[in-house]
Amino acid sequence: MSNTTNTPPTIRWQLLSTVSAFALLASTYAAGAAGNDADRPLIWIELGGQMENVSGLGDAFAPAFLAANPTSSVLLSPTPLQAQKPPSFSFGEEGKISFQPEDSDWVFSAGLRIGRSGNFRHLHHQTYAVHYPKYKYGVPHGEMITKENFADTQAHHKESHTVLDFSAGKDVGLGMFGGNNSSILSFGVRFAQFSSKSALDLRARPDLHIGFFTAPAPASWFRLLHEYFNTYHATGHASRSFRGVGPSLSWTGSTPFVGNQQEGELTLDLGVNASVLFGKQKTRVRHQESAFYENTKYSSNYTQVYKHPSGGHSNVRSITVPNVGGTVGLSWRVEDFKVSLGYRADFFFGAIDGGIDARKNETLAFKGPFASISVGLGD
């Protein structure tokens, strides 16, 4: 989901090492206990990936001159605001290890999801026309000159997210249709880290005007050209993050509806989760806008420079973030091998301060498809 500071490599290695250690311990146990339970594996190792639409990453920078020039052709679609749109999808990896001791309906698991996205957009719009410094009886005279309307936008965006879950669950026997199904209610701990960075550099001359006036005597048959316009420059930088940990509750259910595990079985998989995360929300936003006005009507050109005060805000505070989510999918299983496809949604309410000049809590949402492959060990 994001990075004000992208997830440091050391933290990722620590998380992956934790899951790997869990797998190693469980595998060692399973090797000693293999053969004691012919009905199910002691361990499931699951690896997969997800493609998630991410929303709630923060507002775009909107310099004042955009609203002051709504009809300028160089500020129309795709606009500087549209150029700042984050990527439509975040791509990531996920892994999960589940361990169920023999002769027990308890399941212990550790799961990790890591996602990231980023883009860079460079838009350049410009008008094209020919102008001459003077006209004699309507005929151009002199070398061609021109100052065109233009808008040049460069927008960067990066985000990353990490979600780590540890849980202990019990098969509560609430299968939907009876038969060889599972229904596991789990309690645990969820750790989440989200961060993003964005930057904007926008230069534009959206309001070039061309005027003519009659030259003074004795050259009064000449019409002289003059220009007047504003040139703008706007920059913006934002970094936003949240890191928190807290208790979690989840339920997963799996019900077969076609085939059997020996020859191939299709199952319907459902899941819901909820947690409360306690952590730190950090934000730093800065932006600046300046303007240059010029009028070439007179021999001594009139120029004036405007520099708006810098804006933005900073925020570091402790917050509580409620989190709810759910999954729905299908799995195809043959003995101790399983392939799963599904759709997942996760909502973290108020996790991100998405404002520009003032704090504005936004719900960070992840929605999209996922796929995974699972292997059972230690039958």
Image (tube, grey):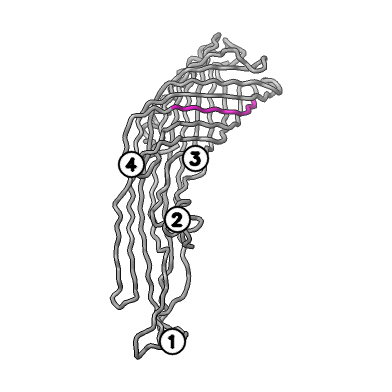
Amino acid type of the residue tagged 3 in the rendering: Ser
Question: Mark 3 and 4 residues: CB-CB less than 8 Å, in contact?
Answer: no
Amino acid type of the residue tagged 2 in the rendering: His
Secondary structure state at the residue bearing disc 4: strand
| Left or right of 218 on screen, residue 342 | right
Indicate which disc residue 136 carries: 1
| Left or right of 251 on screen, residue 16 | left
Question: Mark 2 and 1 residues: CB-CB less than 8 Å, in contact?
Answer: no
- Foreground mark, 3 or 1, reads 1
- Of mark 3 and mark 1, the one earlier in the sequence is 3
Magenta stretch: includes residue 324: yes
| Left or right of 337 on screen, residue 156 | left
Magenta extent: 322-332
Residue 49 % position (x, y): 53, 34
The image quarter containing residue 256 is top right
Residue 126 % position (x, y): 46, 65
Secondary structure state at the residue bearing disc 3: strand
Residue in the image at 51% along x and 16% along y: 169
Residue position marked by numbered label 3 in the rendering: 90
- Of mark 2 and mark 3, the one earlier in the sequence is 3
Amino acid type of the residue tagged 1 in the rendering: Lys
Disc 3 residue crowd, few under 14, some 14–19, many 20+, Cα 10 Å: many
Let me know if residue 305 appears in the view: yes
Residue position marked by numbered label 2 in the rendering: 122
Cα distance between the residues tagged 2 and 4: 24 Å
Let me know if residue 5 appears in the view: no
- Foreground mark, 2 or 4, reads 4
